[in-house]
Image (cartoon, rainbow, N blue to C red):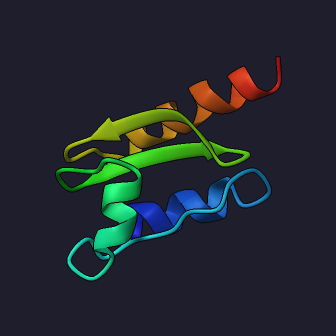
Amino acid sequence: MNILHELSGRFESQVRIFIIDGEREKVVMRQYRISGTPTFLLLYNGTEWDRSWGRSDFSSLQSFLQRNLSRQNR
């Protein structure tokens, strides 16, 4: 969780990070076809742009966000 809070602060003006409890939010899990956790979805204007699943460290998630944010700025 601390990694997500740090990323949220670092990318504050560019992304919003939400943590969903998969056990409680089964509708959301089905809606986005999430079958395992952790799963990281990047949505842009309501459309899924990218997905990463499995345990990730800070550097991997930061790269995931940077790669996709540079795509958005093209």
Seen from the viewer's position, the closer of residues 63 and 53 is 53
**Nearer to the camera, 44 or 3:** 44
The residue under the point 61% across, 29% down is 68
- Residue 28 visible from this viewpoint: yes
Q: In this rendering, would 57 be left or right of 46?
A: left
Of the pair 60 and 42, the residue shown nearer to us: 42
Q: Position of residue 14 (x, y in %)?
A: 75, 50
The image shows a total of numbered marks equal to: 0
Locate the N terminus by quadrant.
bottom left
Which picture quadrant has residue 47? top right
Q: In the image, residue 22 lies at what x, y percent?
A: 26, 71
Q: Quick one: 66 or 25, which is closer to the camera?
A: 25
Using the image, determine if residue 45 lies above or below residue 2: above
Query: Quick check: can you spot residue 1?
Result: no
The quarter holding residue 65 reads top right
Residue drawn at point x = 39 percent, y = 48 percent: 40
Q: Quadrant of residue 29?
A: bottom left
Q: Considering the image in quadrants, where does the C terminus appear?
A: top right
Residue 51 in picture, x, y percent from top left: 40, 36
Give the residue displayed 35% in from the left and 69% down from the top: 27
**Image height check: is 12 above or below 52?**
below
Q: Is residue 53 left or right of residue 18?
A: left
Q: As drawn, which residue projects farthest toward the top? A: 74
| Residue 18 place in picture, x, y as percent | 51, 68
